[in-house]
Image (spheres, grey):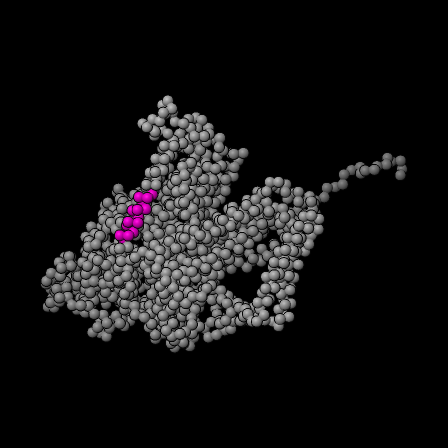
Amino acid sequence: MTEKAPSGAGGFDISRAWTDERVRGVIFQIALVLGVAGLAAFIVNNTIANYEEAGLSFGYGFLFDTANFDINQRLIEYASTSTYGRALGVGALNTILVAVMGVAAATLIGFVTGVLRLSNNFLVSRTVAVWVEFTRNVPVLLQIIFWWLIMLALPKVRDSLSLGETVFLNNRGVRLPSPIFEDGSAIVLTIVLLGVVATAVVRRWAKKRQDATGRTFPVGWAGLGLIVGVPVMAYFALGQPLDLDVPVQKRFNLQGGVSITPELVALWLALSTYTGAFISEIVRAGILAVSRGQTEAAGALGLRRNLTMREIVLPQALRVIVPPMTSQYLNLTKNSSLAVAIGYQDIVSTGDTILNQSGQAIEVISLYMVFYLTLSLLTSSYMNWYNKRIALVER
Amino acid sequence: MKFKQIAGAVAVAGALCVAGGMPGQAATLDDVKAAGTLKCGINTGLPGFAYTDDAGKWTGFDVAYCRALAAAVLGDANKVTFVNLTGKTRFPALAAGEIDVLSRNTTWTLSRDVDLGFTFIGVNYYDGQGFIGRKALGVKSAKELGGASVCIQTGTTTELNLADFFRINKIKYEPVPIETNAEARAAYDAERCDVYTTDASGLAATRTTFPKPGDHMVFPEIISKEPLGPLVRQGDDQWADIARWTLNALITAEELGVTQGNVAKMAEGTDNPEINRMLGKEGSMGKMLGLDANWAARAIAAEGNYAEMFERYIGADSPLGLGRGLNALYKDGGILYSPPFR
Amino acid sequence: MTGQPFHRSRAEMLQERPAPITSVGVIGWMRANLFSTWLNVALTLSALALLALTVPPLIDWTFLDATFAGSAGKDCTGEGACWAWLDQRIHQFVYGFYPAEAYWRANLAVVLLVPAVGYLLFANLPYARYGRWFSLAYPVIAAFLLVGGLGLDVVRTDQFGGFVLNLVAGITGIVLSLPIGILLALGRRSRMPIVRTFSVAFIEFIRGVPLITLLFVAIILLPIFLPREVSLDQLVRVMVIITLFASAYMAEVIRGGLQAIPQGQYEAGQAMGLGYWQSMRLIVLPQALKISIPGIVNTFIGLFKDTTLVIIIGLFDILGQARLLQTNQDWLGKVDYETFLLAALFFFVICFGMSRYSINLEKRLDTTRR
């Protein structure tokens, strides 16, 4: 593969070394390393000088200082007396929350609309197409702000829409009753978990049996009974150990229960519809990539249309769909940083406040980057694993 | 100047643009003169203080100070390059020398003055943080706000003051953080939050923009001191002096009755020695600052004295309709007080 | 039976009858397309319901109930949208603070983009020989027109704004990222380990972090990284970062193109005695770039939409102008949706047009390879 430079009669001729590709490569790489190192030294040097001049000291010690500001959505314990580090942690969890919710919703939206767009129902496929094109081609930042404005236009807190006086919707978000766990509730929860495990076992067994004998087993019903039915019976048998903290209208706000802020809802809707529209296109392309003969073969075997889609077409389409999907998931996660525009307190929003108070710019921004790089790495390694699992196995 | 412009042209083509010499430690004045323009950091949009007119020209109370300073230093109130800065970008921009002075409703605090390495050159507006709420709520005081939702702008000192206030009074509240003043107003208007907290000047401005201002009230509590003023980088005392005494000249001009209309005439000489010293007829104050004798006269001629600027952009007859309050001269019951020109 | 021959079949044809009314024409089409199964009926009805719920109110609000005349927000008293600001402020939406007497320069720069791109993509246009040179010179011409100098009045970069800022940032980013992206893609496939490592590290780093954090680097950190004496224009810093950002994505698109070129092409280059750069320039890259064009267009669409992020660091692009108008005393609280809707429309028209074009191109390139 590597060609020899014609260099004299076998000897190494230093004067013609430049014509040797390998020598050139080595020289070029050394130069590159020196260049990058020089640039790094230049930057570090300037940074030290500028920090000294501004009287700042580099270091992450400030993370242990008191934050002195509040965060309205906390997945872990936090108060204004907590540290900057904890505030960043709360923000990071908020980012992860909206990213996970967004990925789930975007996948669902993408698959449903992707399939609908291929529907032979003219009206449906056109409507979906218009929606996809409009959503894809408008900046996501604009859409986030748009959804936020929509949330503001919901009924005011005193005119909340309610579902049987337990679930409330108003422009301060959604308020749900929260469970209060009493004695015995742990047993019920354990039973639910056991039900999930049992369902998984049943599913494996049913699949094996179907592969061997062709007989099917109603896994769905069995699972429903195991995950819902048995725990409900246990719940009543134990004397209803679970109570609900139902929100009630107080002077200013609804109190009690858990609240989902409109900022979270707006961000979630915007991210999941935006990414959903891209996924929709990917799914459509993936389905179209499955040869038509597969559908026809399934039809010849007498499979119904939805079964054909579920058992024949989608599994094959997934191989085409998954790789580009990974980058959509990553985009969604990165786009969640635009939360800052509507005041959803994600890692960038809380970090900005910290940056503004402490002046530790390099440290805060480097933490953003480490956080997002880690998220990207985790997402792509999971997706790579999944992609390998569903890849075509040659038998 | 020419070099910088050509550099700008090259820059957009993608090359790195090295724009002129930048301030080292003690040469801001020389750099401003060499550049022929004053780089002034202002808000990205705050009614009354920094906003654009229909022609897209920046104007407002904070902007007027920049123009006065440019007039004092460069002799032309229009030789200002405005750099719009957000709450987050303002300090790095000043620290890095991208702007010569920051005039962006910035609160004078110890940590900013000392830790971040800036020098506040005075106060052009004494403010304090307050609350606005609907009268229909029946709340008379901010201390009755237990359980309320409170809109705040993120990344500012108001966020910290708010947390402190509720902590001291042991009241629970739901903070609703919002990125910009415009969004906070929209959120409050839609009743996303029960009250909105920001500087009192901002509250008054916001109140006038509601369809029925009478339905809203500003609560009596002022929970913080917010002396807002221009600031410069630490370490260039001459430049800080120029910025400081330009502001003082505007205040003293009000005290001594020097206005935009009569400054030209008064500069020719009056019976009052302090006016004469300030406007360069007597003494050599301009030279002490490194400027010429007419510096203060030009600064006052640019946008008028403090009172004129105040009335034009934020005063009772402007859309904001702010009273002078603390910002009246000391002899009129306020705390505005300039050291003497002597 | 009077001696006539017995016919087992008809003597004459039955008259032709039209197909049942239920399977042709409008009704037939509807049966086949909209109501073929129960599921389809349900889908059709829900789609109809959705359209009925959204479209008429939207049209009412946007046009029928809207106010078009007036000089301030208080003139907009109707139920519908407030468009009265359009005639006063539309120029700021498009051009930002760009001086009015120089609008023609921005217009010309945008119009000239069409032949510049055209000559780059199509070989069969008239005057193609000179056209290529024009394409190469276009960035310089555009920069000259936009910024001025050499006889034209100079426009300061802080006067850039509105949609022109989005266009300038997007186009600059994509044009400059092309060569960098090619180098990075080649670097990633290089046999030199250090070059490969640096390329991979750079590409994956940029692709792994949100653009907004990179913009913070441009605005907040770059001044710290550089010596005190050096100060870069704010817009320039943003463009440098946008270019680097786009380069990483561009590199991946081009790498895809490079991978699609059969190994034989590389070997053929070597067999002809071409050096690495020669065979890249003459054989591999022309083919790889050609099949990368749809990807490049898509990267551009993405980048173009991302230019709206500059509002977060205080530049006044079209969203920034919308914000400015929303905070204006005269229009406060009246134009929130309207201004954003207009901005959305601007983006939609450009991005949708380009994505159509990209799909078109993809199809055409596809047939040539078959």
Q: Residue at x 23, y 49 (%)?
A: B21
> Which quarter of the rendering shows the C terminus of chain C?
top right
> Which quarter of the rendering shows the N terminus of chain C?
top right
Give the side of residue C289 with respect to residue C103, left or right.
right
Tell me which segment is drawn in magenta: A36-50
Query: Which residue is at the front of the view, C243 or C28?
Result: C243
- Residue B311 falls in image quadrant: bottom left
C95 up-or-down from A247: above or below: above
State how many labels appear.
0
Give the side of residue C204 with respect to residue B273, left or right.
right
C16 up-or-down from B82: above or below: above
Q: Is residue A44 magenta?
A: yes
Query: Which residue is at the front of the view, B143 or C208?
Result: C208
Q: Main secondary structure of the magenta part?
A: helix
Q: Residue at x 56, y 51 (%)?
A: A111
- Residue B288 falls in image quadrant: bottom left
Q: Is residue C309 magenta?
A: no
Residue A58 picture location, percent across and down: 31, 56
Q: Residue at x 39, y 57 (%)?
A: C322
Give the side of residue B92 with respect to residue C38, left or right.
left
Residue B29 picture location, percent across and down: 19, 55
